[in-house]
Every structure is written in structure tokens, then in C-alpha cells.
Amino acid sequence: MSFEPNKAENLDACIKCSACTALCPVAAVNPLFPGPKILGPDAERFRLEGLQIGTTLLNYCSKCKTCEITCPSGVKITEMITRAQEDAKISGGGKTLQFSIRDYLFGRAEYLGRLAMISPNLTNVLLKAPPVRKILAQVLGISSEAPLPAYNPKFKGTETGRQSKKQVVYFPGCFVTYNDPPTGQAIVKVLEHNGYEVIVPSFHCCGTPLEGNGYLNEAKEIAKKNLALMDPFMRAGIPLITGCTSCGLALKECPSFEEPESELQTYDLFEFLWQLHEQNELRENFNEVQVSLGYHASCHLKAQGIGTPSVRLLRLIPGVQVAELDQGCCGLSGSYGFKKEKYNTAMQIGNPLFNRVRQGVASGEFQSVITECGGCQVQIRHGSGIKTEHPIWVLMQAYGLN
């Protein structure tokens, strides 16, 4: 979530090369989607003059940020499209009332999680019931085929509370907090194993669901709240760690518009661990782990420009073999693939990846798949039927941690 103070200045950087459209996963499978160049910089010129065009097509952007990764000029294409979505919503165009209500709810993943935590078991039963899924599809436009993740008891940090002079702040994110608490526990244990006291404040959502559903201004406001919570840790120079690539991208972009007095040191988990390795501070008394894995790099990891530190680190463990899949986007893109009118598009986007996963397992090249993104894990399991989990679990085995 970066916010350019001068819209026109960034717009004029577009050199019309169309590289963004050539690599856009949505444009590749949907011939009616004109692509990020047309809906971004080209249409922005009209929007700056007060003209709204292509409002319906704007909603087919998945916010994967592939366009921004590709752009040689650093144009904030996703931001332009998201801002245009929000303006169209305010003016009453581009969405039906049904889809507007649904996107309003999807944008508030934190509050949906809190509601589900009242009775997670009942919530899971209802979300799996065909009659309920049919009602959700008809009333809210939520696909009856989409792999809605199960809710689990809320992540609350560890019970050990290990005290250490070395400290990190852990930002779990909504997926770990409400859907996958064991992964959060594993991340904390690995950090503690490396001598760190792990602080887990009561953060808000990172804002990515809001941005992904066209609520850019609200995403900015929630980022301000998180920065206020992080301020004492920033001032103390304590680094912030997250194991979710979407949360990591959102948190890394916070300072670009907030300009806090203290620098926010934000790291992807494996980016941080690899830095420890380079400084000879990582515990590398690894047990041998005989496993072969396929690795999927999420779009929001690529957008951070840090490479694939988890792959580099896991290859240090005796017995671990990792094949990088390199098959593009999984298609889910947050809540994009849960939407009735986008489910098929999401599955078509992910098909090359699903096929590669199935072929890799069938040929014995690898046994299962790892990826840092919780949404990608859900989508790959759904599309391929193959076990997919966070790479922290391999490190847990290597360290001999329960």
C-alpha cells in the first residue's frame, strides 16, 4: 500500500511498453480484460479529468501486483486501479449492491475472524454445508465451489514467554490468527530457538484485504493504527517479523506514506533468518530431514524484491531437496478467487501451477508443496489435491522442535 502524493508524476513515467499487460495473469485467461496498462495509466488520464471509464472491468484486477513487478519505470499501476475502484464505488458505479456488500465483508477479514471465533466449530460446519454455500452464492455472490478456509482457535502467542536481550515483534496476520494458529506457534518457537524473545502485540489486520476489495483509504487508516502500535518497538529498534508475504508487503510499504520518525525494520521471516545465517548468528545444528519439496513463490513475495530466502535456507538442511515451481500466480489473490464471478478465472490462472504440482508429485520429483502465503496454500491444495504448507514446518523438523 504505497500512496503517491503526485498522481500525474507517477502516471507520466509509463513508457507504453505493455510489459505489464503481457504478464498479467488475468489478461492471459480473460480476453475481455484489457489489462493493467489500459485500466491503469491509460484510463488514469481520463480519470484525472473527472471521467470514469471501464468501471466494471476494474473489478477484475486481482491485485497480484505482477504489473508493478514487471514495470521498468516503477509505475504504481495497482494503486491507480484500486483508487479508481474506490472512486467508482463512491459514485455508485461498477458493482451491484450484492457484490458491494460481499466485498465490504471480505475487506474486513479481521472482523469476520472475530465473529467466527465465537464458535469456530459451528462456523466450519456451516461453511461446509451445501445449503449454506448455495445461499452464500445466491445472496452474497460467494462461489459455492471456492475453498473457504476453516477457522481454528485464535493464535495468542506461546506459553513459554522466554526472556532474552534479543527481541523481535511478530505480526501473525489474519490467516495465522484465525485459520492457522499452529503455524504461528511454530514461527515463534523457531525464533525462540534462535535466542529471541518474541513479542506479539494485538495488531489489527495489515489492510491488504481492504485494498484488494477497493477500500484504499480505509487500508491507509488501518495502517496508521498498526504504526501507532508499533511505534514504541520502532523507537527501540526492535525488528518486526511476519511469516505472511501479503502482510509483509503491506507492512514494508507503510513507511512510504507515513514517514515515521523511527525506521520500521520489517522482515519476511525467512529474510530475517537468512540474514542471521549470513551474520553467523543462525543455529544450524540441523537434523537430517529426508524430504523433497516443490516451492511456490507467491506474487506478494516477488513484489518485495527479496528473492526466495526460504529456498536458500532450507537447502542448508541435510536431506532437503527443493524444486522451484515458477508457474506464476495461484489465482486466489486474497478473496478474489472466492467470488462467484471470478472463481473460474482464478482456477484458470492457477491451472499451470496445479498441473505442475500434480506432475511433480506423480513423477516423484517432490512429495508435497511449500509456500509462505496462506491463501496460496489453500488454493494449491484445492486445485491440485496435494498437501501444501508453510516452509516453517521443515525448519521445525530440522531443529527437532515439537
Image: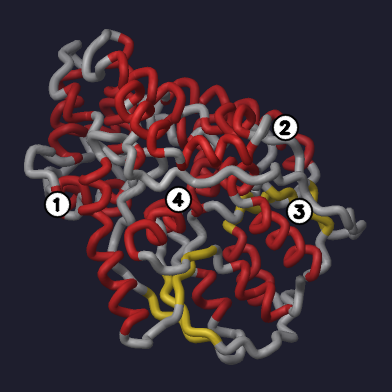
| Residue in the foreground of this view, choosing between 322 and 256 | 322
Q: Earlier in the sequence, mark 2 or mark 3?
A: 3
- Tell me the SS state at disc 2: helix
Residue 334 seen in render: yes
Q: Which residue position holds label 1?
A: 28
Residue 229's disc number: 2
Which residue is pictured at 23% across the width and 34% down the height? 341
Q: Earlier in the sequence, mark 2 or mark 4?
A: 2
Q: Nearer the viewer, mark 4 or mark 3?
A: 4
Label 4 neighbour load within 10 Å: few <14, some 14-19, many 20+: many
Q: Which residue position holds label 4?
A: 375
Q: Earlier in the sequence, mark 1 or mark 3?
A: 1
Which residue is pictured at 56% across the width and 68% down the height? 391
**Looking at the picture, how far across and down is residue 101, in whole percent?**
38, 18
Query: Real-space Cα distance between discs 4 and 1?
Result: 21 Å
Label 1 neighbour load within 10 Å: few <14, some 14-19, many 20+: some
Q: Nearer the viewer, mark 2 or mark 4?
A: 4
Q: Residue furthest top?
A: 91
| Left or right, 308 with reference to 277 | left
Q: Earlier in the sequence, mark 4 or mark 3?
A: 3
| Residue in the foreground of this view, choosing between 240 and 186 | 186
